[in-house]
Image (tube, rainbow, N blue to C red):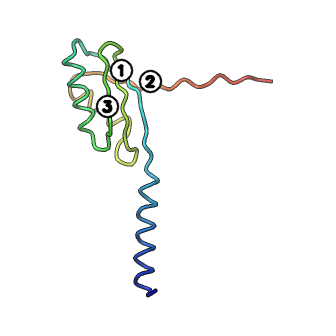
Amino acid sequence: MSLWRIFIAVIFFVSTSLAALAAEQTATLKVGGMTCASCAYQAQKALISVDGVRKAEVSKQDNQAVVTFDDEKSNVAALAQALVNVGYTAELIEPEQPATTEQ
């Protein structure tokens, strides 16, 4: 095998390995200011427009948005800003930590 082919193989391996390092994250945001089903649609539309967002589900009933995104392309601050830009408030809902037992 020529050095050129080895070089190409290494470059391909490294580039595909780096892509695997990007982690898919899911964040739950409390969304304030939604008054109707149309609001939930507008909030969802704003979230989906953020680069890296793969899925956004918004519930007017729960006043929440559950967003799945690529953390190499986006972050929670960008998600919250997208909601603020269309007139809503946004706050990260921290996942509950399991209780620890002291011995």
Q: Which labelled disc corresponds to residue 103?
A: none
Q: Residues within 10 Å of mark 1 (few under 14, many from 20)?
A: many
Question: In percent of the image, x 21 and y 19: which residue is there?
Answer: 39
Question: Which residue position holds label 2?
Answer: 93
Circle 2: residue type: Ile
Question: In percent of the image, x 39 and y 48: which residue is there?
Answer: 72
* The C terminus: image quadrant: top right
Residue 30, x across and y down, in percent: 37, 21
Question: Which residue position holds label 1?
Answer: 64
* Mark whose residue sits in front, 1 or 2: 1
N-terminal of the two: label 3 or label 1?
3
Mark 1 touches mark 2? (CB < 8 Å): yes
Q: Quadrant of residue 24?
A: top left
Question: In percent of the image, x 29 and y 15: which residue is there?
Answer: 60
N-terminal of the two: label 1 or label 2?
1
Q: Quadrant of residue 100?
A: top right
Distance CA(mark 3)–CA(mark 1):
10 Å
Question: In percent of the image, x 43 and y 39: which residue is there?
Answer: 25
Secondary structure of the residue carrying numbered label 3: strand
Secondary structure of the residue carrying numbered label 2: loop
Residue 59, x across and y down, in percent: 31, 19
Is residue 48 placed above or below 65 in the rendered structure? below
Residue 48, x across and y down, in percent: 26, 35
